[in-house]
């Protein structure tokens, strides 16, 4: 069965931009697009969408939300097949369940709670921590056109070649026809012993060499035709990835799936880039 690209919409402008971004993603992958509105409330309490529809906010209903999102997605990518669904349930649970049968899930960077856009909405955080497929959270101020900045950035984690995050980043770069930049941060020990036996005969920056080796190992199985850039940055991983996100079309990070009753938990790096990156962020579940 061909899986769709699923996007969660709630009537907010970030979720409408996510619908447009998801339409681009579906077009790249030759997939259909599924627009989902999940809420226990029948009405939408907001001003922006109501103004667009020419209705009082108290009269804007779930069908108006998915209908508006559908029109914007079709304008963006007329050739993509679009379906819609209204789920009368709590948004986080509904979207996590949808992720079981999604190729990719896309969400806006925040919902309609009124929190400043720099912070990620609670629903997006919950879904990012428990989704069963790659989740893309659309961040950044540009128009999110594919290839606008000309690179996909991969944050290289501890897991080596063959990780789900590496495969996803490679696929995105190939689909968009842009280079893949693999980034690994490294830090010096605060009290580095000068005569430590592991450091004898090694370069001055032993940790930097280890970071470079991790990048090489992660890229070991990448296709020969893919343009790849390798980069090691001294500092904290979160800060390094936030810096490179300013020049990326998409930042890809892995999230380890830990044993528990409700899916994976986000680490500090994934959590940090989801809240503060300057571009869309893909969080890819890794099974350990």
Image: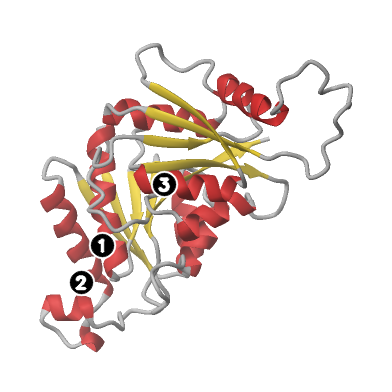
Mark 3 surroundings: few (<14), some (14-19) or many (≥20) residues within 10 A: many
Residue at the image point whose x is 59% and y is 50% from the top: 269
* Residue 71 or residue 208, whichever sits in front: 208
Q: Is residue 156 above or below residue 59?
A: above
Numbered tag placed on residue 146 in the rendering: none
Residue 35 lies in quadrant: bottom left
| Element assignment for label 1 | helix
Q: Residue 149's spot in the image, x, y percent? A: 28, 40
Residue at the image point whose x is 22% and y is 38% from the top: 27
Residue at the image point whose x is 22% and y is 53% from the top: 143
Judged from this view, the residue extending furthest toward the top is 224
Residue bearing mark 1: 16
Do the residues under discs 2 and 1 have CB atoms within 8 angstroms?
no
Q: Residue 98's spot in the image, x, y percent? A: 44, 52
Give the spatial CA distance, label 2 vs label 1: 12 Å
Numbered tag placed on residue 245 in the rendering: 3
Residue at the image point whose x is 55% and y is 56% from the top: 272
* Residue 227 or residue 199, whichever sits in front: 199
Numbered tag placed on residue 64 in the rendering: 2
Number of callouts: 3
């Amino acid at each position: 069965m061909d899986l769709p690209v699923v996007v969660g919409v709630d009537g907010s402008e970030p979720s409408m931009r996510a619908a447009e971004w998801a339409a681009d993603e579906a077009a790249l992958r030759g997939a259909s697009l599924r627009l989902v509105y999940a809420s226990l409330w029948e009405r939408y309490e907001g001003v922006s969408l109501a103004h667009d529809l020419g209705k009082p906010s108290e009269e804007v209903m779930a069908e108006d939300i998915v209908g508006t999102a559908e029109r914007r997605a079709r304008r963006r990518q007329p050739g993509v097949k679009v379906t819609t669904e209204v789920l009368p349930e709590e948004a986080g649970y509904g979207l996590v369940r949808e992720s079981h049968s999604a190729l990719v899930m896309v969400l806006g960077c925040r919902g309609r709670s009124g929190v400043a856009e720099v912070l990620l909405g609670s629903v997006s955080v919950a879904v990012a921590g428990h989704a069963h497929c790659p989740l893309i959270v659309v961040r950044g101020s540009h128009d999110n056109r594919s290839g606008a900045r000309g690179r996909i950035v991969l944050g290289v984690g501890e897991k080596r070649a063959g990780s789900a995050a590496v495969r996803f980043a490679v696929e995105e770069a190939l689909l968009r026809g842009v280079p893949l930049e693999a980034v690994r941060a490294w830090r010096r020990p605060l009290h580095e012993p000068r005569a430590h036996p592991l450091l004898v005969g090694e370069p001055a920056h032993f940790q930097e060499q280890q970071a470079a080796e991790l990048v090489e190992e992660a890229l070991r199985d990448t296709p020969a035709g893919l343009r790849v850039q390798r980069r090691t940055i001294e500092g904290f991983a979160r800060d390094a990835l936030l810096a490179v996100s300013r020049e990326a079309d998409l930042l890809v990070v892995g999230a380890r799936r830990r044993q528990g009753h409700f899916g994976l938990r986000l680490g500090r790096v994934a959590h940090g880039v989801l809240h503060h990156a300057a571009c869309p962020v893909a969080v890819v579940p890794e099974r350990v």
